[in-house]
Image: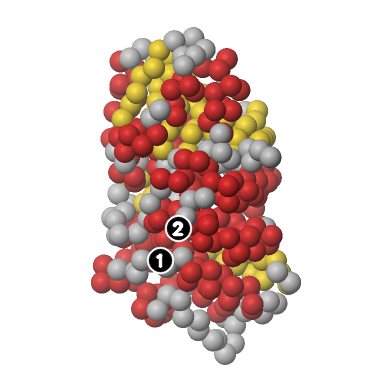
Amino acid sequence: MSLLRTLRLAHERGSTEILVGPGAVAAAARRWAPWLAGRTVFTVSSAPVRALHGDVLEALLAPAARRVDLEVPDGEAAKSMAVATGLWERMLAAGGKRDSRLVTFGGGSVGDLGGFVAGCFLRGIEVLQVPTTLLAQVDAAVGGKTGVDLPGGKNTVGVFHHPVAVASDTALLATLPAGELRSGMVEVIKMAALLDPALLAAVERDLPALLAGDAAALAPVVAAAAAAKVAVVERDAREAGERRVLNFGHTLGHALEAALGYRGLRHGEAVAYGMLFALRLAERRGLDAAEPALFARLRRLLTRLELPPLPTGDLDPADLVERLGRDKKAREGGLAWVLPAAAGGEAGEGRIVTGVRVDELLAELPPFLAAPFARVRYTSPSP
């Protein structure tokens, strides 16, 4: 039985086809050959990804009239205005037109950068994404959000620009380092905890195989996580309301990444610590009262990931609070936190909570940084 699954994300520009499972790139080559035929196709990727999987692109790009490979740095270093500007200049010099195509091939950083570059070049050219990491397949490549970083914050410049298609081939995940698989699994857990109890149970059951990069085990998990995100994005394409629950763990996670100079913690690992801090804030408000077992399950599952320790010597609570204020999700009225709340039974939900005071954050951060997995028993909920 084929493990390949097709999802569709409807949006204001039409729809995005999302192919998930072993063989997704080969299926995309058959499906999207007319889209590539006769066009100049720009590919955005990094040297390590091309070295590992460059042959995967050959069949996909065969119909193109001309192929221009654009190499970018690996990881978060790719997401800068300098790199984006360099790509635009090279694309213009190569004769790029409004009907040229762009294909991203790599992890979430390459997808974010490539999508942003495509969305802005000549006011927008079409892009197809081939995510090669678990994090990108379950989250970054789905939903149309693109962007680059500024020194003051992550993803602070960007546009909404949906790809025409996403080919999430889980066979590509077998070569990922353990840390990258762990990082992506955090995003799966995030969505499962708030949107899909069955997916959360599957992750708990199959975690060893998932972290080993087993394509067959990963295929239904990637598809379920992507489907959960698709459903939310279709209801809130511009992140004006419900979609903000997908930022569970990202508020502090992004501040941690920026404070560490995007070194020492992968994105998903920083988000995991952000989730643990959100659990702490939620318990402070009594949001675990309906079903405290859910909060315990999340802590146990995140513990099983064996996260690298927080480099506490490089983190200052006051600096983190300042960075939180510059988060791209902040509004004029302040920063909203996504806090988990137990909805009863095995279900969880995300609550958008405002009014978290600076003095509260400064009080909670030092003990959290010292013991992030510890549960604090509050005598009475905070308002």
Residue 212 place in picture, x, y as percent: 47, 55
Say if residue 116 shows up in the picture: no
Which residue is at a point 33% across and 56% down the rendered structure image?
Answer: 258
Q: Residue furthest left?
A: 313
Q: Image quadrant of residue 108?
A: top left
Q: What residue would you read off at disc 1?
A: 307
Depicted 109 relative to depicted 99: above or below: below
Q: Quadrant of residue 207?
A: bottom right
Q: Is 158 located above or below residue 42 in the figure?
A: below
Judged from this view, the residue extending furthest toward the front is 1
Q: Nearer the viewer, residue 217 or 79?
A: 217
Pointers 1 and 2 in contact (C-beta within 8 Å): yes
In the picture shown, does residue 95 fall above or below 247? above
Disc 1 marks a residue whose amino acid type is: Leu
Q: Depth check: 66 or 366 in front?
A: 66
Residue 13 image position (x, y, % from top left): 62, 28
Residue assigned mark 2: 182
Q: Residue at x 50, y 27 (%)?
A: 127
Location of residue 342 in the rendering, given as x and y in whole percent from the top left corner: 67, 71
- Disc tally is 2
Instruction: Name which residue lies at 34% across and 23% down.
Output: 69
Q: Is residue 309 visible?
A: yes
- Mark 2: which amino acid? Arg
Question: For mark 1, does the 10 Å Cα neighbourhood hold few (<14), some (14 to 19), or many (20 or more) residues?
Answer: some
